[in-house]
Image: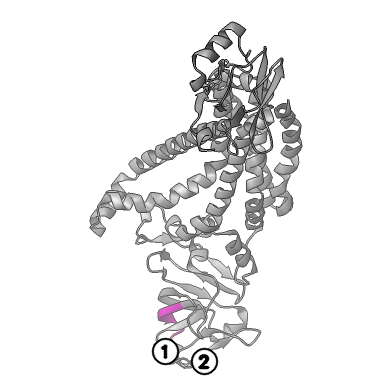
Amino acid sequence: MAASRSCWRQVIQQGAAFPAVASTAERQSGHAAGSSNRRQGEIAQLASVRQLVAVCVVDMPPIIGEGVVRFTFGKNRLRGIVSGDFRFDPVTSVEMIPAVYIIDRYLLLQFVKSFLIFFVSFTGLYVVIDSFNNLDEFLRYGEETGRGAFPILIDYYTPRIFTFFNMTGGILTLIAAMFTVTWLQRHNEMTALMAAGITKERIVRPVIIAVAVIAVLGALNREFVVPEYSDALSRNAQDWLGQSAKQMQPKYDNLTDVLISGNHTFANEMRIEGPKFRLPRSQAGMGAKLNAENAFFKPAEGDRPSGYLLDNVTEPENLAEIPSLLDREDRVFVMMPKDNAWLAPNQCFVVSELTFEQLTASREWRNSASTWALVSALRNRSLDFGADVRVEIHSRLTQPFLDMTLLLLGLPLVLKNDNRNVFVAIGLCGAVVVLFFAVTMASRGMGANYMISPALAAWFPLMVFVPFATYMSEAMRA
């Protein structure tokens, strides 16, 4: 076996089939001239397939007769099929490279290179344009923190690269796949492979598997990586340090029927400036409002639930004399200093399961939250999300299937037309992407506006495009 491993190898570079040996006299002379060098069998070159198969010929004697050898993919290894009047010495053995086929490695390498080039190019373009638009802010943050602008740029754009991968993963895999197949056709490699008896479906199989792997990585990225950066993603370049005041939009806490409003919010302190908490009508006897200078969100700790600590309360004036307030289910929802020694006389605590992120940046929080966090938020009685969040949850489930469907819509266009022009392939890819995303966005918009159910809004694109993808994929089976 060691001898067979060290045998002579030749990379077949051209053609799909070859005649064996032309002349018996030449074979005999070659055999007589080098009986000690019998490993060097005659292998003619195949046309236009670069780096296709490495053939190891062990103790190959002269081949007698004329014929054709073609290569097909078996279950676990590449097989050489011999036809014609061939006769081999019984000790002859031909070893093919097993398992991971060379053509599979070749296609995977081309696809991965194309995908990385496109991803790095588009990501770099986004980072360069956006950073130049916000360069003054980054320079100022670098001076304020004493770290310099470059670390600020890294902190700011690292989480956004992951979100950029979420947004562009499906499109870039389609572009890379179409570019890889077009490149194969342009250099006549597809023709040679098909002449060797390999179907289009088998040729592009490694590309399809690679796209499926990237789709799974995209799902893992959405569920585990992006949520870790939710706080950073909720801040823009103008308020990266969270020190800028943002106008606050009032929001109801549906669990306690308290309307939470204020003048401005500050993300770095989770603070509301000038909070105005309007209490439910059942508490009108003590006054309709709780006004203060500031309110700070406090996560749950020990026996104390989560909520907002109002500091320097200005209304009502007799705060220290008022007992804690109970809701309709006899649960404390406003803690007063009279019953809670940890509160100062001018402080009170409003119980709420509405977090500061959900209160101030609902859309950004929704985009960066995991699916489980969105489902948990729907179960949060303090929140009342609309249909758009339900559409988002269903869309998270369908996104990997949408990525694969997009591939199976675009790839057959190149295979069916035997297109050799890279720019035509890019044009076809663009047309497919525009149509696909137009239907997808229209469907999700209808679901968010209660025109159709959220589940139907997320699954409708698959219902439309999967039959077309199935029909068009017949071109790959030819």
Where residue 335 sits in the image (x, y, percent)? 50, 86
Residue 329 numbered mark, or none: none
Q: Amino acid at mark 2?
A: Pro
Image quadrant occupied by the C terminus: top right
Q: Quadrant of residue 327?
A: bottom right
Residue 445 appears anywhere in the view: no
Residue 230, above or below 427: below
Q: Looking at the image, is 434 positioned above or below residue 48? A: below
Using the image, determine if residue 370 lies above or below residue 442.
below
Tell me, yes or no, whether the two marked residues, 2 and 1, touch with CB atoms within 8 Å.
Answer: no
Q: Is residue 258 magenta?
A: no
Which residue: 56% across, 57% down? Answer: 223
How far across and down, in percent of the image, does residue 211 sit? 59, 40
Q: Would you identify the image quadrant in which residue 43 lies?
A: top right
Residue located 63% across and 54% down the image: 388
Q: Residues within 10 Å of mark 1 (few under 14, many from 20)?
A: few
Report the mark closest to the observer, 2 or 1. 1
Q: Position of residue 424 (x, y in %)?
A: 57, 21
Q: Is residue 413 left or right of residue 305?
A: right
Residue that appears at 53% across and 56% down: 363
Residue for badge 2: 323
Q: SS for tag 1?
A: loop
Q: Nearer the viewer, residue 228 or 376?
A: 228
Q: Tell me the quadrant of the picture where the N terminus can be found.
A: top right
Span shown in magenta:
309-317
Q: Which residue is mark 1?
A: 342
Chief SS of the magenta region: strand
Relative to residue 326, is residue 455 drawn left or right?
right
- Indicate the amino acid at tag 1: Trp
Q: First in sequence, mark 2 or 1: give its number.
A: 2
| Mark 2 nearby-residue class (10 Å; few <14, some 14–19, many ≥20) | some
